[in-house]
């Protein structure tokens, strides 16, 4: 959580409800980006309580979509912004599972695999990738087993911030078509000697693969010619 101030807000009507889109002077909330859903939580003070339903970006502004639980909002209000930590943690483990999945797919079916999109939520993860055919049941089973092996082995999840050209030299994988800033975050999954995954990523992650518990692939199928989709859950 953090102490902050309401800079601006506006009312919006959504499905018959009056919601508020609020910009704060600073925020601990993660805004939806790179397939990861935005944080939820609470913004409050002694006279006001807002439930944050989600957080998203408009250009470089972090916007909190809220509903008022009690009180009235005013520009300049000093408030405490608190994320839903339990939900954030579940999002983190599902996001880390996406990195493990891409590494496992490359290991099982080859370098043809390239990420084509993802959606990370607190109770599921969807991963789209380029591949020319359906995976066999044995390949799906092997991919899942390899991920769970890495989870059991408790690989460290490490984040480094570096110049984009330096990041490219490390061999980190970038998402095709994605625009990156001059300074990027690189997320590596390693046991200290062996690195199984290294990707450009601005999302939130578990500190260790051991935090993921057990992963289960619940579906694998085509969404377009040459593009497959896997959905999985961390249980």
Image (cartoon, grey):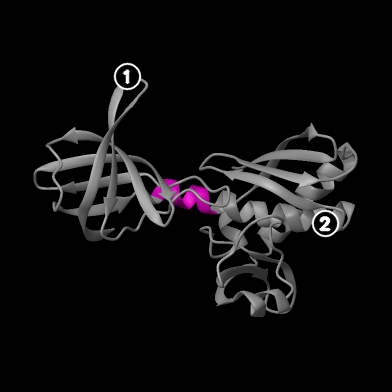
* Residue 18 to residue 81: above or below: above
How busy is the neighbourhood of tag 2: few (under 14 within 10 Å), some, or many (20 plus)?
some
Quadrant in the picture for residue 103: bottom right
Q: Position of residue 235 (x, y in %)?
A: 59, 42
Tell me if residue 78 is in the magenta stretch.
Answer: no
Q: Which quadrant of the view contains residue 112?
A: bottom right
Marks 1 and 2 sit apart, C-alpha to C-alpha, by 46 Å
Residue 168, given in percent of the width and then of the height, sits at: 70, 74
User: Can the viewer see residue 233?
Assistant: yes
Q: Residue at x 43, y 50 (%)?
A: 57
Q: Which residue is mark 1?
A: 16
Residue wearing tag 2: 106
Residue 152 lies in what quarter of the image? bottom right
- Magenta-colored span: 86-92
Q: Is residue 18 above or below residue 162?
A: above
Residue 174: give x, y in percent of width and height.
69, 62
Q: Residue at x 30, y 23 (%)?
A: 17
Label 1 vs 2, first from the N-terminus:
1
Give the structural element (helix, strand or loop) at label 1. loop
């Amino acid at each position: 959580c953090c102490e902050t101030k309401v800079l601006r807000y506006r009312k919006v009507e959504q499905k018959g409800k009056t919601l508020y889109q609020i910009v704060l002077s600073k925020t601990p909330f993660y805004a939806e980006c790179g397939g990861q859903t935005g944080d939820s939580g609470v913004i409050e003070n002694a006279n006001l309580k807002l439930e944050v339903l989600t957080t998203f970006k408009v250009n470089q502004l972090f916007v909190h979509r809220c509903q008022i639980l009690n009180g009235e909002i005013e520009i300049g209000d000093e408030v405490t912004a608190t994320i839903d930590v339990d939900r954030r943690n579940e999002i983190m483990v599902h996001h880390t599972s996406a990195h493990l999945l891409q590494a496992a797919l490359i290991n099982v079916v080859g370098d043809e695999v390239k990420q084509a999109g993802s959606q990370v939520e607190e109770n599921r993860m969807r991963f789209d990738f380029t591949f020319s055919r359906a995976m066999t049941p044995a390949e799906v089973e092997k991919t899942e087993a390899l991920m769970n092996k890495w989870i059991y082995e408790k690989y460290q999840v490490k984040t480094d911030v570096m110049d984009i050209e330096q990041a490219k030299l490390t061999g980190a994988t970038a998402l095709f078509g994605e625009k990156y800033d001059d300074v990027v975050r690189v997320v590596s999954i390693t046991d200290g000697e062996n690195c199984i995954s290294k990707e450009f990523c601005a999302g939130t992650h578990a500190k260790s693969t051991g935090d993921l518990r057990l992963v289960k692939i619940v579906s694998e199928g085509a969404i377009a010619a040459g593009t497959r989709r896997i959905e999985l859950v961390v249980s």
